[in-house]
Image: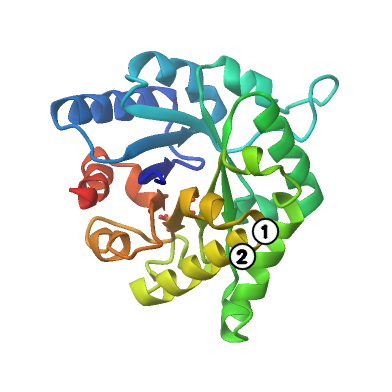
Amino acid sequence: MRKKIVAGNWKMNKNLQEGIALATELNEALAADKPNCDVVICTPFIHLAKVSDVIDHSVIGLGAENCADKDKGAFTGEVSAEMVKSTGAEYVILGHSERREYYKETPEILKEKVLLALANGLKVIFCIGESLDEREANKQNEVVKAELEGSVFNLSAEDFGKIIIAYEPIWAIGTGKTASSEQAEEIHAYIRSVIADKYGKEVADNTSILYGGSCKASNAPELFAKPDIDGGLIGGASLKCADFKGIIDAWK
Ligand code: 13P
């Protein structure tokens, strides 16, 4: 059966010392009180190697927030999937709406990134989700379907099994405006049906689909109680140990 996951996306927050302190605090909190789900923290590149040393990887998985769309070579400032993997990280977030919007990452670029991440043994947390305009025009289903088709439906069923989907409505990210649990469940069920049409029911049933967008300890229990919501991808509330642990505890 599919995994329950709570993943943090630190985004561009925390200097190195603050990041190590947060990871250490979370590691201690989860050693004292074992989670009922997989926990992942996705940090800026520069934190990965040090954070890898302070966490118990059997309790906390580590991920990057991005990787390059090229294998290696003269790409000044880029960080490859192989480099990410060499830090001890096991995951990478790809397709986040902030990368699509601010850094103009296209479906083709994301397709390359996904292939390189998988080739280097990383699990991919692949983000999809509609804008407010698209939601108001009732286009959310076609948007998420196109995002899947554009970057991950080229994969074999075996490789697709290494993908975690994160549904993040752009209008709910960092806005304090969460999708209602009914709205989220409706589109999660739709996403699962699209995966089932492409890869079959077994693959779809085994795919974890996370919700992201102003998820916090107060709304996580209601969201996670829905049958097609398998956890969360957490931004702001992953930056404080107690807030993040509160969301992890929603699985208890
Ligand atoms: P917030 O939890 O801050 O809304 O961010 C969600 C997100 O973008 C996680 O990737």
For the residue pair 99 and 113, the one nearer the viewer reads as 113
Residue 238 lies, with reference to residue 41, above or below; the image says below
Q: Which residue lies under the disc numbered 1?
A: 198
At which x and y percent is residue 232?
A: 39, 52
Residue 79 appears in the picture as rendered: no
Mark 1 residue crowding within 10 angstroms, few (<14) / some (14–19) / many (20+) = some
Q: Residue at x 51, y 60 (%)?
A: 167
Q: Secondary structure at mark 2?
A: helix
Q: Is residue 136 above or below residue 91?
A: below
Mark 2 belongs to which amino acid?
Answer: Val
Left or right of 250 on screen, residue 77:
right
Taking the spot 50% from the left edge, 43% from the top edge, the residue there is 11
Residue at (35% x, 63% y) in the render: 227
Residue 56 lies, in percent from the top left, at 32, 19
Residue shown at the point (22%, 52%) measured from the top left: 250
Disc 1 within 8 angstroms of ligand 1 (CB): no
Question: Dot 1 lies on which element?
Answer: helix
Instruction: Please provide percent x and percent y for residue 154.
Output: 76, 48
96 or 227, nearer to the observer: 227
Q: Where on the picture, by quarter, is residue 195?
A: bottom right
Q: Position of residue 5 (x, y in %)?
A: 37, 44
- Identify the image's colour scheme: rainbow, by chain, secondary structure or one colour: rainbow
Label 1 with label 2: CB-CB less than 8 Å:
yes
Note whether residue 8 is visible. Answer: yes
Identify the residue at the far left of this view: 32
The kind of residue on which mark 1 rests is Lys
Q: Label 1 vs label 2: CA separation? A: 6 Å
Ligand 1, seen in the image, is in the quarter at bottom left
State whether residue 9 is above or below residue 34.
Answer: below
Number of other residues with Cα within 10 Å of mark 2, as a class: few under 14, some 14 to 19, many 20 or more: some
Q: Which residue is mark 2?
A: 194
